[in-house]
Image (cartoon, rainbow, N blue to C red):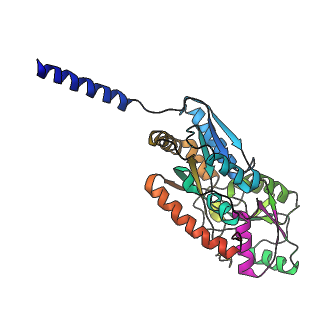
């Protein structure tokens, strides 16, 4: 009799455990993807593409809302996510601004305040000029910059972020001077270059692909250790692979930027796992593979310890880059 009671108790415990194991956390309301930059830029385009993939493949039962919080060079979006401690219905699509914004200001923020989900790609930067400009090589552009006595205007997203950091590194390497013009996003920087209000920008491929295809922009070089892998023609004559590296053109400046999703701090492991699994489903879709190729993104997916190790290394590398560019915040 006693043995039967024990058996029944154990069976009940096992059954309850199985039910708990079968239960998995899911969002109970719409999920916000916070883009800490303006509309039309690479981060915004990525968030909206992922929003479309989720809806098309019904990967979530709740809708996804993309919110642009572009204030203070991305600081508004970072601090909004930090302030949402324990909120599992918010994601931040982030870039190297995770480190650069706090380093160049006194922003009380660290990526360790958040919960890493997944790095889904690395992005490139291209030196773009207007196709009507006389310079067709990096050397011609640098010579024109030197001859202009500092009047060449280079546009980019925000102040003291990746775009201006690259511009500063180019100036240090070549001994020339630019006027850096900050915009709210890469889309605006591309429009200003098309209108010849600036002479160049250092947009991501996705931010200027439309203008490049239309013959408005010229890709002088990519700030990468090797050429981009994609061979399909984008313009009538060029693929992404046809764009030389800046080092090939005599300009030894390299910079690549992570594309990573983060959650607020204080969420549960189950909530984190839900979004890790979601990102794995997203990157397995044909639409995502098409997005990678169209926008010349480097395919790289990291989660867990591999991701946190990468973030720590990348932060340390950016500390050196920021110091070289001269943008470390004064104490």
Residue 138: x and y in percent read: 74, 74
* Residue at (69% x, 47% y) in the render: 44
Visible residue check, residue 298: no
Q: Is residue 159 magenta?
A: yes
- Which residue: 17% across, 23% down? 7
Q: Which is nearer the eye, 199 or 62?
A: 62
Q: Nearer the viewer, residue 241 or 58?
A: 58
Residue 204 image-quadrant placement: bottom right
Image quadrant where one finds the C terminus:
bottom right
Instruction: Give the side of residue 35 with respect to residue 312, left or right.
Output: right
Count of labels in the image: 0
The quarter of the picture where the N terminus appears is top left
Q: Residue at x 61, y 73 (%)?
A: 320
* Place of residue 175 in the rendered image (x, y in percent of width and height, measured from the top left): 76, 82
> What's drawn in magenta, residue-wise?
153-181
- Is-magenta flag for residue 221? no
Relative placement, left or right, of 299 versus 157 is left
- Residue 161 drawn at (x, y percent): 71, 62
Q: Give percent across and percent down for residue 318.
A: 61, 68
255 or 235, nearer to the observer: 255
* Residue 70 can be seen in this image: yes
Q: Quadrant of residue 87?
A: top right
Q: Quadrant of residue 182?
A: bottom right
The residue at the far top in this view is: 1
Rendered residue at 66%/74% (across/down):
323
């Amino acid at each position: 009799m006693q043995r039967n009671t024990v058996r029944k108790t154990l069976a009940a415990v096992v059954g309850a455990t199985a039910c708990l194991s079968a239960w998995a956390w899911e969002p109970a309301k719409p999920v916000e993807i916070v883009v800490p930059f303006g509309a039309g830029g690479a981060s915004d385009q990525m968030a909206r593409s992922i929003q479309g993939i989720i809806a098309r493949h019904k990967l979530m039962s709740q809708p996804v809302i993309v919110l642009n919080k572009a204030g203070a060079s991305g600081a508004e979006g970072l601090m909004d996510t930090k302030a949402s401690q324990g909120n599992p219905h918010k994601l931040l699509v982030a870039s190297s601004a995770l480190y650069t914004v706090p380093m160049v200001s006194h922003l009380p923020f660290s990526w360790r305040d958040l919960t890493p989900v997944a790095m889904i790609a690395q992005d490139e930067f291209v030196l773009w000029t207007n196709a009507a400009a006389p310079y067709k090589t990096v050397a011609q552009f640098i010579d024109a910059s030197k001859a202009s006595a500092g009047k060449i205007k280079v546009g980019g997203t925000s102040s003291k972020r990746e775009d201006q950091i690259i511009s500063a590194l180019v100036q240090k390497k070549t001994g020339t001077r630019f006027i850096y013009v900050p915009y709210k996003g890469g889309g605006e920087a591309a429009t200003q270059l098309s209108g010849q209000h600036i002479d160049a920008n250092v947009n991501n491929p996705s931010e200027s692909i439309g203008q490049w295809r239309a013959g408005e922009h010229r890709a002088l070089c990519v700030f990468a250790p090797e050429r981009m892998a994609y061979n399909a023609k984008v313009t009538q004559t060029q693929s992404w692979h046809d764009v030389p590296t800046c080092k090939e053109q005599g300009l030894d400046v390299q910079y690549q930027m992570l594309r990573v999703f983060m959650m607020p701090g204080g969420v549960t492991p189950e909530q984190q796992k839900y979004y890790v699994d979601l990102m794995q489903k997203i990157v397995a879709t044909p639409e995502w593979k098409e997005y990678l190729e169209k926008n010349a993104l480097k395919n790289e997916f990291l989660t867990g310890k591999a991701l946190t190790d990468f973030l720590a290394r990348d932060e340390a590398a950016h500390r050196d880059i920021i110091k070289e560019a001269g943008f470390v915040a004064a104490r």
